[in-house]
């Protein structure tokens, strides 16, 4: 199964027709749609243009690599740009290959076969990863689901107390309905504004949460303030933010509840 991500309808149709002689093919027209299709279609490979509307190919690749349920899908990025810097950046974000336009049919097919072989090898290691209790993502947003976020929060809180570190929980509540199609961009907005070490989850119904271990209340407030505009643009609604700082004997559930209640 191959997912072709291309915003030019003509190029998308030609590429899909070429590949359908060998593979089952679906097409997405932008990076946000690609993230959703990657979870529903479960492709063996994604062939994605870099320059896409809404979410570009580079950001989409980084998001796919960050999510446990899609990180093993090989991605080939395609671009009319042939600079070395573009290729290096694509590969550094997790793409397995970079193909410059225009390309030959035999070259494309050979690259796809090679990338699929590498993806199969990675998937053979999946049972061992699952045995370690790998966290699960909420499908639409690509963030941890409520159960996994709560479990990670409890782990981080225990670690923070053990080593005498600070910890802040941030709750984000949209003041209006959030469409499923907007959740991928919401996930990107949250990740872009927070540190790679921060734990981020989508708790459902337009409610998101983040665990900022090692951050002071002022640092967490600054980080959340900086990402707020991007998050509001992504969900198309005003978002209320509230913070709860770990202290005393409060457990993870109580800490999260305090932040969520303050965000009402």
Image: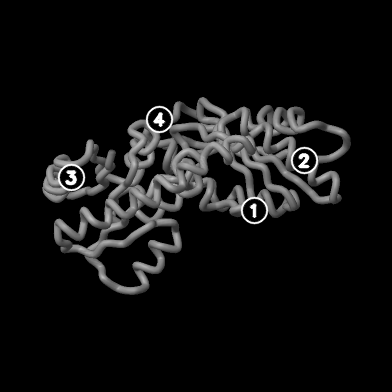
CA–CA distance between discs 1 and 2? 21 Å
Residue 71, percent from left and from top:
46, 46
- 159 to the left or right of 140: right
Note whether 209 is above or below 88 in the view shown: above
| Mark 1 touches mark 2? (CB < 8 Å) | no
CA–CA distance between discs 3 and 1? 48 Å
Q: Please report whichever mark, 4 or 1, sits nearer to the chain's N-terminal start.
A: 4
Residue 163, percent from left and from top:
84, 50
CA–CA distance between discs 4 and 3? 29 Å
Q: Dot 4, how many residues are within 10 Å of its Cα: few (below 14), some (14-19), or many (20+)? A: some
CA–CA distance between discs 4 and 2? 31 Å
Q: Nearer the viewer, mark 3 or mark 1?
A: 3
Q: Nearer the viewer, mark 4 or mark 2?
A: 2
What label does residue 180 carry, if any? 4
Residue under label 2, please give it: 157
What label does residue 222 carry, if any? 1
User: Residue drawn at (21%, 56%), measured in percent from left and top?
Assistant: 108
Residue under label 3, please give it: 19
Q: Please report whichever mark, 2 or 3, sits nearer to the chain's N-terminal start.
A: 3
Residue 245, percent from left and from top:
77, 41
Q: Label 4, secondary structure: give it.
A: helix
Q: Nearer the viewer, mark 4 or mark 3?
A: 3
Q: Dot 3, how many residues are within 10 Å of its Cα: few (below 14), some (14-19), or many (20+)? A: some
């Amino acid at each position: 199964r191959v997912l072709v991500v291309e915003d030019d309808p003509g190029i998308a149709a030609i590429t899909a027709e070429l590949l359908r002689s060998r593979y089952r093919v679906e097409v997405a027209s932008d990076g946000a749609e690609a993230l959703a299709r990657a979870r529903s279609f479960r492709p063996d490979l994604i062939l994605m243009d870099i320059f896409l509307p809404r979410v570009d190919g580079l950001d989409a690749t980084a998001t796919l690599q960050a999510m446990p349920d899609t990180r093993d899908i090989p991605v080939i990025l395609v671009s009319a740009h042939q600079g070395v810097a573009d290729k290096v950046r694509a590969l550094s974000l997790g793409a397995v290959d970079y193909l410059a336009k225009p390309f030959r049919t035999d070259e494309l097919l050979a690259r796809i076969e090679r990338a699929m072989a590498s993806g199969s090898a990675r998937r053979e290691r999946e049972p061992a990863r699952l045995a370690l209790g790998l966290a699960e993502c909420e499908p639409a947003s690509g963030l941890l689901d409520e159960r996994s976020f709560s479990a990670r929060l409890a782990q981080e809180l225990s670690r923070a107390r053990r080593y005498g570190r600070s910890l802040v929980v941030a709750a984000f509540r949209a003041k209006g309905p959030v469409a499923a199609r907007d959740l991928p961009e919401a996930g990107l907005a949250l990740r872009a504004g927070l540190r790679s070490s921060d734990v981020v989850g989508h708790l459902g119904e337009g409610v998101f949460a983040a665990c900022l271990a090692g951050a002071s209340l002022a640092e967490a407030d600054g980080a959340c303030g900086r990402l707020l505009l991007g998050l509001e643009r992504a969900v198309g609604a005003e978002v209320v933010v509230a913070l709860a700082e770990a202290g005393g004997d409060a457990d993870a559930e109580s800490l999260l509840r305090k932040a969520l209640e303050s965000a009402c």
